[in-house]
Image: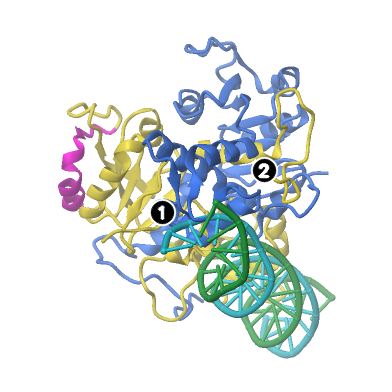
Chain colours: A yellow, B blue, C cyan, D green
Amino acid sequence: MTRTIPDHSLRENPNDAVPIAPVGHPIPDIVIRRLPIYVRTLRSLSESGVDSVSSEELAEQIGISAAQIRRDLASFGRFGRQGKGYSTAEVADSVAEILHLNRGWDVALAGFGNIGRAVAHHRGFPPTFRIAAIFDRRKEGREEPSTGLHILPPEAISAEVRRLGIELGIIAVPAGAAQDVADRMVEGGVRALLNYAPVVLRVPDNVVVREVDPVAALRSMTYYLSPAAGDGPDAPATAGLRAG
Amino acid sequence: MTRTIPDHSLRENPNDAVPIAPVGHPIPDIVIRRLPIYVRTLRSLSESGVDSVSSEELAEQIGISAAQIRRDLASFGRFGRQGKGYSTAEVADSVAEILHLNRGWDVALAGFGNIGRAVAHHRGFPPTFRIAAIFDRRKEGREEPSTGLHILPPEAISAEVRRLGIELGIIAVPAGAAQDVADRMVEGGVRALLNYAPVVLRVPDNVVVREVDPVAALRSMTYYLSPAAGDGPDAPATAGLRAG
DNA sequence: TCCTGTGAACTGATTCACAGCA
DNA sequence: TGCTGTGAATCAGTTCACAGGA
């Protein structure tokens, strides 16, 4: 019944992660993942008083090629003005709308340890995202000070999430509890999960998952660093270096 | 002098992120990013008493195709035994060694707000990663309780990082301060950055950056959800839906 | 017989290069 | 003239399919 949809950006063709079969040809997930960067950058430019940018200037700023930016944006319509560029404010708004960011989103948070608390107090979530329910086995019954939310036990996830009509969940529980919590959220109607736990979640095809895994990120970067402490810079192992 | 190396998994060909030109043909960064998942999964299997797995079983568990796993591992040598599979413990160790995880890594942390504190107290970092220096403009002079580290001002980053020989940095400062902090770390010799700030950092070619951006992840997932609050499930916009 | 390692085929994303609009 | 939008070419990563070792 459940099939793995790993994301953690490991697949080259993350179209698997596209949960709903859309009409027409679907936009690849990799493009969708770039859209928030466009919104953020265009808004920032707009707020700095820059009204218009060329794909070239934007590329310079974001570190993506100009052609790719043009293609990404063009896949949703004609946003640019030839000879002129893109209107920062207008395109930011349009892309935000494509991402359904022109409405508020209630979010369910499971896990209120170090990570969960940092998430709950994160300044970057509002106004679009609002923690509307918190679950934690060990802190059950307590109250989250700033919001006054009562912390509920994991058993309550499914019903509470359904009651509130929540579609977005954040998993910040230990690895061993993550799959259970994910199942409960999905059962309650959640269709998108942000996963901080270091496990690959198995969810139905119509649920999207994104992994946030700083430890894995660190562990992959050390590949490019010195093999031994005190060593100077050194090239990493390649195909020429046989490990067997 | 500095060129943008965005990562945040936005590029299809993140070879740009490979900082050091290796001999032989280089392993694509996307493969490197999968290696920690192999290590984690194989270790977990090994600890559960499973001594051997086929690529098929591993694939089932990780949600990646068996062929891809075989190819990834084979690019570093012959790890498998034909007719038998892979030895969980042995391959976990070998891959960990390829990633240079068979040594400890000192890490510099910039920013001691919500995120920085959560990072400092994160259980998943040790024993491989150890926060060895903390910087924060506003908490300068204070002491981090659990480690006893004195919090230093950003101006001290470059010298302190160099003094300690630190190659890994974590940026958990507000967006506006991130680039300055990144520059100071790089100046001090840091060659890999984990960036929690919502900005694309500009770093020299020989520095790797990985982005951790939960807000961007949420903002991209809402694409697949209901356009308006209270709406039922709905297909996302496609090429057929012209936004212009 | 089982399962790895790997050429070859394929799929999908990025870049090139330019027609065409303002 | 400047810059978008987009076919065509290119490049990279994934999957197929199978030879061959244990």
The subunit carrying tag 1 is B
| Mark 2–mark 1 CB contact (< 8 Å) | no
**Left or right, residue A140 beside residue B99:** left
* Quarter of the image with the N terminus of chain A in it: bottom left
User: Dot 2 lies on which element?
Assistant: loop
Disc 2 target residue: A243
User: Dot 1 lies on which element?
Assistant: helix
Residue A78 is a magenta residue: no
Q: Amino acid type of disc 1?
A: Glu
Question: For the point 47% across and 41% down, which residue is it?
Answer: B42
Quadrant assignment, res A72: bottom right
Disc 1 target residue: B57
Seen from the viewer's position, the closer of residues A188 and B1 is A188
Q: Is residue B114 above or below residue A124?
A: above
Seen from the viewer's position, the closer of residues A95 and B169 is B169
Q: Is residue A57 above or below residue B240?
A: above
* Residue range (magenta): A147-165
Q: Amino acid type of disc 2?
A: Ala
Question: For the point 79% across and 33% down, which residue is it?
Answer: A233
User: Counting other residues with Cα less than 10 Å from the Cα at mark 2, is it few (<14), some (14-19), or many (20 or more)?
Assistant: some
**Left or right, residue B104 beside residue A225:** left
Give the CA separation, mark 2 to mark 1. Answer: 23 Å
Residue A128 placed where, x, y %?
Answer: 38, 50
Residue B139 placed where, x, y %?
Answer: 55, 17
Residue B197 placed where, x, y %?
Answer: 56, 39
Residue B201 placed where, x, y %?
Answer: 66, 43
Quadrant assignment, res B173: top right
Same chain letter for marks 2 and 1: no
Seen from the viewer's position, the closer of residues B96 and A195 is B96
Seen from the viewer's position, the closer of residues B13 and A3 is A3
* Quarter of the image with the C terminus of chain A in it: top right
The subunit carrying tag 2 is A
